[in-house]
Structures are given as C-alpha cells and as structure tokens.
C-alpha cells in the first residue's frame, strides 16, 4: 500500500492509497485545496472544519450536476442508438427487397 502526503489549506495529511494511485490522489488533493482557496477568497477563513464541509458540499453539487448531465447524454445516446438500429433494420429490409426485385426482373427477362 502506498502513502501520499497532500496539503490542504496549509495542513499536511498523510493518506494511504492503492499502489499506482499516488498521482491521482495528489491531483485530487490539489483540486480540493484549490476549491478551499476559492472559498476562502469568497467568505474568509471560517475554520478548517467549516471550510471542509462547505467545500465538500460544493464538490458534491458539481458531482450531482455531472451525474445529471451524464444521464441526459445517456438518454440522448440511447435514442440515437435506437434510431441507428432502426436505420440498420430498414437498410437490411431495403436490400432484401432489392434482391427480390432483381430476381423477379431476371425471371421476367427469361420469359
């Protein structure tokens, strides 16, 4: 198990993580620290606990918005996939009809 040290609002935290996840954890720590810095700029230093709770709620709100957008995109893609499936079925049907017409035409030419 790996260990990473992240600094958030000037405080250092040693965090354990799976091997290979160190860079991701450092990136996330920097993101949280950045969001806390933005919050401090807006409301001032209101205590670590309160800042962490407020930042957690802001990040949870971002995550909620991302999930909502993802679901919307999935619904759109599902509709697009259904249209593509319908187009494939219609294309196959048209091809089968074209072959039947060619067979009938060939039969008429022989007659």
Image (cartoon, rainbow, N blue to C red):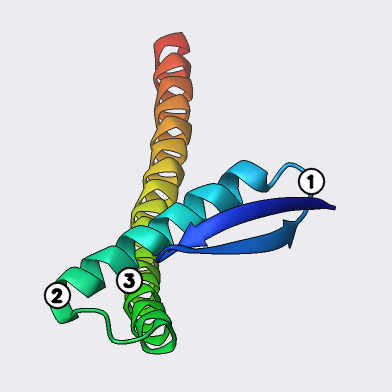
Q: Which residue is mark 2?
A: 42
Q: Residue at position x 19%, y 79% from top?
A: 44
Q: Which residue is mark 3?
A: 62
Q: Which mark is residue 30?
A: none
**Mark 1 Cα-neighbour bin, 10 Å: few <14, some 14–19, many ≥20:** few
Q: Which residue is mark 1?
A: 19
> From mark 2 to mark 1, how far is it between C-alphas?
37 Å
* Rendered location of residue 1, percent (x, y): 85, 53
Q: In this picture, is 3 found above or below 33?
A: above
Q: Nearer the viewer, mark 3 or mark 1?
A: 1
Q: Would you say 67 lies left or right of 5 here?
A: left
Give the position of the C terminus as an image quadrant. top left
**Mark 3 Cα-neighbour bin, 10 Å: few <14, some 14–19, many ≥20:** few
Is there a contact, CB below 8 Å, between mark 2 and mark 3? Answer: no
Q: Earlier along the polypeptide chain: callout 2 or callout 3?
A: 2
Q: In this picture, is 82 found above or below 93?
A: below
């Amino acid at each position: 198990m790996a260990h990473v040290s992240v600094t958030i609002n000037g405080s250092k935290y040693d965090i354990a993580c799976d091997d290979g996840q160190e860079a991701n954890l450092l990136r996330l720590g920097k993101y949280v620290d950045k969001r806390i810095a933005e919050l401090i700029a807006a409301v001032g230093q209101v205590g670590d606990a309160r800042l962490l709770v407020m930042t957690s709620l802001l990040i949870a709100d971002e995550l909620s918005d991302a999930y909502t957008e993802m679901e919307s995109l999935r619904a759109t893609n599902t509709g697009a996939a259904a249209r593509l499936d319908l187009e494939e079925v219609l294309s196959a049907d048209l091809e089968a009809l074209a072959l039947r017409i060619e067979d009938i035409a060939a039969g008429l030419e022989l007659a």
